Amino acid sequence: MISALTGTLTSVEDTRVEIDAGAMVFTLLIGSADAQALRVQRGQVVTLYTVLYLAGDAARGNLEPTLIGFSRSEDRAFFNLFTTVKGIGVKTALRALTIPIDEIAHAIESRDVRTLVKLDGIGKRTAELIVAELSGKAGKFARAPTGASRTSVDLKPLTAFTPDEERAISRIVAGGDRRADAEVLLVKVRQAQPELKNASDLWRAMIKSRG
């Protein structure tokens, strides 16, 4: 079994990446919520935690091994839990990962069906089933919702970012922070040091602000 894969990230699309692991190049499927953070790591050596499953038609004998990659082992653990819900297979679960996993887990624990039905491929009945089966089990994967960490800053600047600001946010997210928290750090830096425009300068200031 392949439980993790380390190599150079050579390609990043909305739902798949390629990793050059030396003698072999692997294609891995990813949740669309991870694509932005991974794009800033293109060309770097990364480790993705993997789930291996067989795709295709067993009756016709054309099964093909497929790898799904996650930036954190905790995200992989949540994915495995998510697919225990009746009616949610691997493909449906992967398609649903359009927002960060910790936000999905928070929605489950808070029984927030309205957020869950916004996920691709998840209807109201399925969302209610997810809550019924996983509420009380997803807490260790959950953090506060996006708005909870923004109460001390003006929300209006969060609606648009320059390309350099987006790159600075992505570097923070690539280090393990939630995007919502990275946006808050950027707004603080905007307010304190409005002269900073370059992505690297913004990123360094955000790190200092976080500390």
Image (tube, helix red, strand yellow):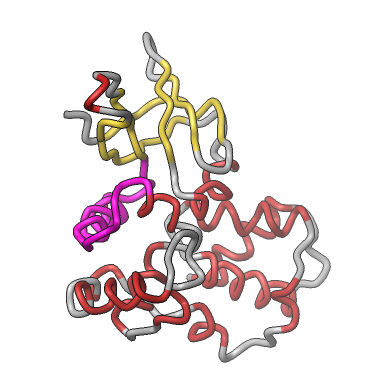
Which residue corresponds to the image point at 50% horizontal and 59% vertical from the top-left? 98
Q: Which residues are magenta?
A: 69-91
Which residue corresponds to the image point at 33% horizontal and 71% vertical from the top-left? 105
**Residue 79 lies within the magenta run:** yes
| Vertical order, 207 against 45 (above or below) | below
Comparing 194 with 19, the one in front is 19
Q: Quadrant of the N terminus?
A: top left
Q: Residue furthest right?
A: 195
* Residue 152 coordinates in the image, percent (x, y): 58, 90
Which residue corresponds to the image point at 68% horizontal and 84% vertical from the top-left? 155
Comparing 22 with 125, the one in front is 125
Q: Residue furthest bottom?
A: 151
| Vertical order, 166 against 126 (above or below) | above
**Residue 109 lies within the magenta run:** no
Mark count: 0
| Vertical order, 163 against 69 (above or below) | below
Which residue corresponds to the image point at 75% horizontal and 64% vertical from the top-left? 161
Left-right relation of 44 to 102: right
* Residue 21 coordinates in the image, percent (x, y): 38, 19
* Residue 156 coordinates in the image, percent (x, y): 74, 83
* Residue 141 coordinates in the image, percent (x, y): 28, 68
| Vertical order, 174 against 25 (above or below) | below
Q: Residue furthest front?
A: 59
Comparing 179 with 85, the one in front is 85
Picture quadrant of residue 79? bottom left
Left-right relation of 46 to 198: left
